[in-house]
């Protein structure tokens, strides 16, 4: 299909958070520019994030006061794609307005992408179940995840509208960077780029760095993007071999998150440290940083819920391979995620090094073996590039995704009235309670768990409080 005559909007309902969701929107914007497609990104600016400028995304700003005007404008557009939504830590009135004044009354074709993985985080999206009803087409990382299964159970008519979300990336940009550095140009360094999360197992990178350091072979380890949170402090920043280098928040943005980093760090203070860790970075700078070093680590895994992986790579994983650096991945992830042809990533020869966390000496042995074998190193580089091109090439995946959305068109079976929807899913008392809460200025919790458990809660701050639907008025 030719999309040059279409007008497409991309909505970031949580604002520009500067991580994976922002990257998805940025990749769509890059694709649209290359193909002459009218696509604009809109950010609901109720929250601001330190990584906001990291991806160079161009966007229009929506606020609670401008939602009605933007909705009227977008009513006439061909497609509105939602990539994020207000959650339970938003100001309640801002979250209510986003749903009632923008998302629900919007007349354009609506496609909803859910980027959250865990049940808990998915259910933190405000007005989740009514939001699901409103979407003409829905996407999650696979059609058999917990979320996808619940959608098909609660909304049987959406079974063929609950689709797999395939990640997409501009292969041309990655190819151009990988061409800048051959193996002989790369430093003996293990890298990590990305934010801190328990799911990313960054401490394993530290363990590998300690093993390398213990062998006195002149290797270094460097990480960028790790914010100074309580979690990162306990797991990595307070590690005895780590030097955490704070960035001056008053420095110009191009220095603060990338570009000339040497202007804002004290290299003398950190020169003897086996591991250096820095906060946020600008993406282009980060890609080149990984490209000029021998190894990149990304140990993302979901050992307790492999059904929620979704047969995908995270952007960090894709980018390590894309810029021509040998990746270190988690073994559990590799065995439970498949390439587009059905082959588990773990079973693809020469894709990279896989670790289970208990094999650190063996991982280091393999790293040193590859580092001393240019033929093996370059074979891994080429294998990985072909794998990500087959799976994530934006020039293929984005048009295929849009084709599916437009082919399905509008969901003519969605329930038009929320009161009727909630009555059908739970009962009239629940529906009445929701109306009472909203009339009193409160925000009801309408996650999948609450609907399935038939229990109504409302938010006080970001905490959930039970609401007695039998004696509802007694709470006021």
Image (cartoon, rainbow, N blue to C red):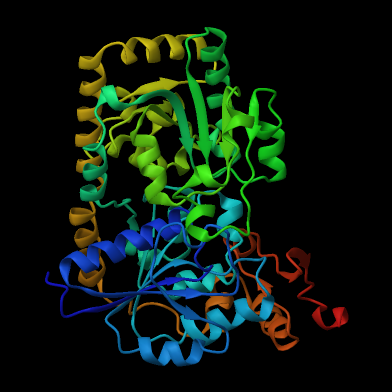
Compared to 273, does 258 lie above or below? below
Q: Residue at x 52, y 8 (%)?
A: 216
Toward which corner of the image does residue 159 lie, by quadrant?
bottom left
Q: Residue at x 32, y 64 (%)?
A: 161
Quarter of the image that includes the N terminus: bottom left
Question: From this viewpoint, is residue 403 visible?
Answer: yes
Q: Position of residue 6 (x, y in %)?
A: 21, 79
Where does the image place residue 151, in percent across and percent down from the top left? 45, 60
Q: Could you say which is closer to the camera, residue 440 or residue 113?
A: 113
Q: Is residue 314 visible?
A: no
Q: Is residue 419 above or below residue 187?
A: below
Q: Nearer the viewer, residue 55 or 15?
A: 55
Q: Nearer the viewer, residue 144 or 59?
A: 59
Q: How many marks?
A: 0
Q: Residue at x 39, y 65 (%)?
A: 57
In percent of width and height, residue 470 lies at 79, 76
Give the vertical position of 270 relative to 122 (above or below). above
Give the left or right position of residue 391, taking residue 316 as reference.
Answer: left
321 left or right of 149 in image:
left
| Foreground pick, 458 / 399 | 399
Name the image quarter holding the C terminus. Answer: bottom right
Find residue 340 and report its horizontal and vertical position in percent. Answer: 24, 40
């Amino acid at each position: 299909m030719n999309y040059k005559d279409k007008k497409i909007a991309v909505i970031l309902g949580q604002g520009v958070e500067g991580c994976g969701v922002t990257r998805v929107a940025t990749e769509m914007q890059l694709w649209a520019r290359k193909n002459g497609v009218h696509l604009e990104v809109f950010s609901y600016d109720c929250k601001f994030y330190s990584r906001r400028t990291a991806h160079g995304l161009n966007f229009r700003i929506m606020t609670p006061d401008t939602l009605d005007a933007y909705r009227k404008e977008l009513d006439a557009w061909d497609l509105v794609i939602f990539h994020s939504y207000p959650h339970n830590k938003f100001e309640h009135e801002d979250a209510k307005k986003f749903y009632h004044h923008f998302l629900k009354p919007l007349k354009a074709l609506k496609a909803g992408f859910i980027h959250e993985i865990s049940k808990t985080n998915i259910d933190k999206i405000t007005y989740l179940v009514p939001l699901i009803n409103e979407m003409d087409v829905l996407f999650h990382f696979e059609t058999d995840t917990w979320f996808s299964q619940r959608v098909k159970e609660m909304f049987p008519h959406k079974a063929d509208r609950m689709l797999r979300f395939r990640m997409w990336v501009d292969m041309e940009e990655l190819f151009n960077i990988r061409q800048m550095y051959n193996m002989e140009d790369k430093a003996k360094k293990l890298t990590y780029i990305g934010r801190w999360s328990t799911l990313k197992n960054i401490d394993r990178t530290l363990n590998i760095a300690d093993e390398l350091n213990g062998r006195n072979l002149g290797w270094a380890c460097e990480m960028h993007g790790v914010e100074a949170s309580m979690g990162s402090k306990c797991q990595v920043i307070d590690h005895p071999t780590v030097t955490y280098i704070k960035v001056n928040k008053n420095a110009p943005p191009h220095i603060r998150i990338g570009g000339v980093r040497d202007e804002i760090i004290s290299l003398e203070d950190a020169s003897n440290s086996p591991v250096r860790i820095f906060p946020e970075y600008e993406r282009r700078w980060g890609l080149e940083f990984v490209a000029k070093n021998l190894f990149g680590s990304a140990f993302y895994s979901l050992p307790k819920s492999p059904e929620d992986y979704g047969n995908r790579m995270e952007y960090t994983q894709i980018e390590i391979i894309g810029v021509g650096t040998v990746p270190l991945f988690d073994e559990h992830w590799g065995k439970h995620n498949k390439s587009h042809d059905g082959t588990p990533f773990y079973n693809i020869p020469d894709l990279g090094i896989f670790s289970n966390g208990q094999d650190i000496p063996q991982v280091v042995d393999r790293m040193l073996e590859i580092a001393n074998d240019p033929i093996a190193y370059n074979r891994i580089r080429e294998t990985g590039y072909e794998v990500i091109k087959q799976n994530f090439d934006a020039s293929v995946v984005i048009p295929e995704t849009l084709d599916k959305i437009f082919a399905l068109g509008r969901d003519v079976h969605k329930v038009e009235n929320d009161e009727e929807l909630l009555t059908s899913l739970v009962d009239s008392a629940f529906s009445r309670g929701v109306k009472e809460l909203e009339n009193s200025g409160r925000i009801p919790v309408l996650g999948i768990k609450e609907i399935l458990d038939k229990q109504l809660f409302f938010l006080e701050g970001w905490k959930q409080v039970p609401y007695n639907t039998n004696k509802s008025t007694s709470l006021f």
